Amino acid sequence: MLYLELFLSFVMIGFTSFGGMSMIPLINDQMLSHGWMTSQEVADIVAIAEMTPGPLGLNCATFAGMRTGGVLGAAAASIGVLLPSLTVCILAAIFLERFKESRFMGNAMFGIRPVCIGMIAAVVIQQSMVNYAGSFLFGISWQAVVIGGVASVLLMVLKWSVPKTILVSAALGLLLGPII
Amino acid sequence: MKKEQRSRLADIFTTFLKFGCFTFGGGWSIVAQIQKEYVEKKHWITDEELLDFTSVGRSLPGLMIGNASVLFGHHTAGIPGALLALLGIVLPPFVIMIGVTFVYGLVKDNPYVANAMMGVRAAVVPIIISAMLKLFKAGMKDLFCYLIALGALALCLFTNISNVLIVVLGAAAGLIYMEVKERHAVS
């Protein structure tokens, strides 16, 4: 049965991956082996996932499900990819809550919190290399740099919210994009 | 169900629905959005707790943003909170993606969409930086923390080591360091 197959396939993708780009090879394998998508379509969906909100894994699940089994297929695939959050993560949440006062947990978290800062810094560097790439001087896009600067001021000086900043940045992209 | 719990659940669901519309850039902007809404404005959680949700969410299997939403929801309103936060965060991308499959051909190579997205992507980095700056003090308690953060940054950038292992290494470093520090203080 198609819905069950979609569900199980995305359960496997969900449990064996840890989010982001690490999911692409797994998704590629599953889509090709079931004949649900071609590799060209997988590449397209990665690009489209970048344009729409939401994590890549969920975007792929929805798209592959829609293509093969309509809205129900999309729902089955999406629930599949979310199953780790609904099971392992809920257990982890209960565990964290129970032991949060313990000295052991406090000490472990003392080391984990700076790791988180380091991981976020890595994301900043990796995303900068992709998001500001272009064909202007030194391989950067001047429009992206200008918009990045405006967004920084809106967020950090004028204390705008994330949604408002994103909307203004999209509008600036539309305005500045056509200029060479 | 008590009235307070009900209004809390409604708040979580509607706020995460809003977050869900703007989770660009691999979902990291959700950290900035939670920080602004629930640390600064509503004071439901602390910066430290947000760091914990992010790092634990990133190191569990599945989608980081789904996991972080579940951890936040559970912490603030139990299992119903976890489920509603997850539903809220995934519903907008789910609906948008269903729409996109119908206009796939139009969207794929459309120059207007490409330009708007260039703008959105350019905003993602400042969004993540603003979250990082606000969380910085909560994560960096002494000099040793800077070493851990730099180590994690280098491992992320220059190796293929999984994030799970990096988080586990951080936990081990924290345990050993605090143990040594406490013994030192006693003697």
Image (cartoon, coloured by chain):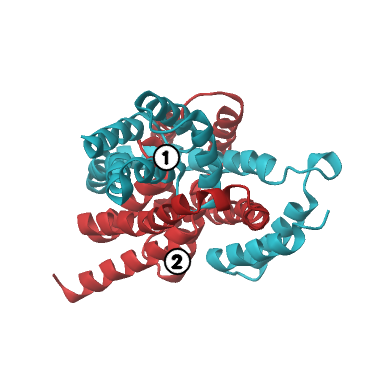
Residue in view at x 64 percent, y 58 percent = B116
Task: Name chain A's colour.
Answer: cyan
Cβ atoms at labels 2 and 1 below 8 Å apart: no
Q: Which residue is mark 2?
A: B37
Residue in view at x 45 percent, y 53 percent = B102
The disc, 2 or 1, on the residue closer to the chain's N-terminal end is 2
Q: Secondary structure at mark 2?
A: helix
Task: Spot the residue most to the left.
Answer: B1
Q: Which residue is mark 1?
A: B58
Task: Name chain B's colour.
Answer: red
Amino acid bearing label 2: Glu
Tell which subunit mark 1 falls on: B
Q: Residues within 10 Å of mark 1 (few under 14, many from 20)?
A: many
Mark identifier at residue B121: none
Amino acid bearing label 1: Arg
Q: Residues within 10 Å of mark 2 (few under 14, many from 20)?
A: some
Residue in view at x 62 percent, y 64 percent = A155
Tell me where residue B81 appears, x and y as whole percent: 26, 59
Residue A172 occupies which quadrant of the picture?
bottom right
